[in-house]
Amino acid sequence: MSTIRGQPQTLIEQAARARHLDPRSPAPTTHLADLDGLRAQNRTYSDTITHQKRVIAELRATITELGEQRKLHLGAQLAASAIDLDAHRRLQLDHDRLTADHRQLSARLDELERLLARTTDDLAASRRAHAEDLTRLGHSHAHIDPTVIALPTSDNT
């Protein structure tokens, strides 16, 4: 600090005195106003930062609380869905056995359906052959009533 007449002088006081000496320099109130504005801006930023820190702390607390609630919820779900490994193994073996049985029975069913279709065709052919035989026999034995000895056709079954 500089001294004037042996007394300490601040920069602001020096600027004020310099203003009085040089009329072209800006008014000292402008510097003071600038400083006051900067101080007010710093207080505003400080208040904003303090508020944001408080909000961040509240949000972190909320995140922690929600995380604990999530753990409790998932823990309750896992406890309710505990799996008996022995029962699961037995069920898996039963499932595999039933699946194999299903495949075998499906194959057997397909085979029986093919056999039924073939047997139905054979029966229809046999009935036609018998009907033809009876018709031939009926002509050779005219005295026999063909309606009595005729077998039903596949349409009548």
Image (cartoon, rainbow, N blue to C red):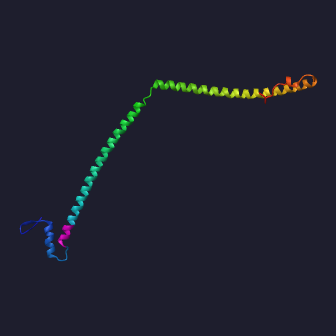
Q: Residue furthest bottom?
A: 23
Residue visible at 93% across and 23% down? 140
**19 above or below 128?**
below
Residue 5 to residue 46: above or below: below
Which stretch did the figure color magenta? Answer: 27-33
| Residue 18: % across, % down | 15, 73
Residue at 26 percent of width and 58 percent of height: 45
Seen at 88% across and 25% down, the residue is 146
Magenta segment: does it hold 32?
yes
140 within the magenta span: no
Q: Nearer the viewer, residue 87 or 128?
A: 128
Q: Position of residue 34 (x, y in %)?
A: 22, 67
Q: Please state which of residues 65 and 38 is positioned toward the viewer in this rendering.
A: 65
Please indicate whether residue 60 sits to the left or right of residue 91 in the image. Answer: left
Which residue is at a point 54% across and 24% down the rendered structure image? 94
Instruction: Please state the horizontal and vertical placement of residue 20, each as a whole percent of the image.
Output: 14, 75
* Quadrant occupied by the C terminus: top right
| Magenta highlight: main SS | helix
Q: How many marks?
A: 0
Tell me the quarter of the picture where residue 1 sits.
bottom left
Please give left or right for residue 88 compared with residue 114 in the image.
Answer: left
Q: Position of residue 153 (x, y in %)?
A: 81, 28
> Residue 91, relative to residue 1: is it above or below?
above
Judge by depth and name the residue closer to the eye, 152 or 22: 152
Image-based side of 115 in relation to 149, left or right: left
Q: Quadrant of residue 30?
A: bottom left
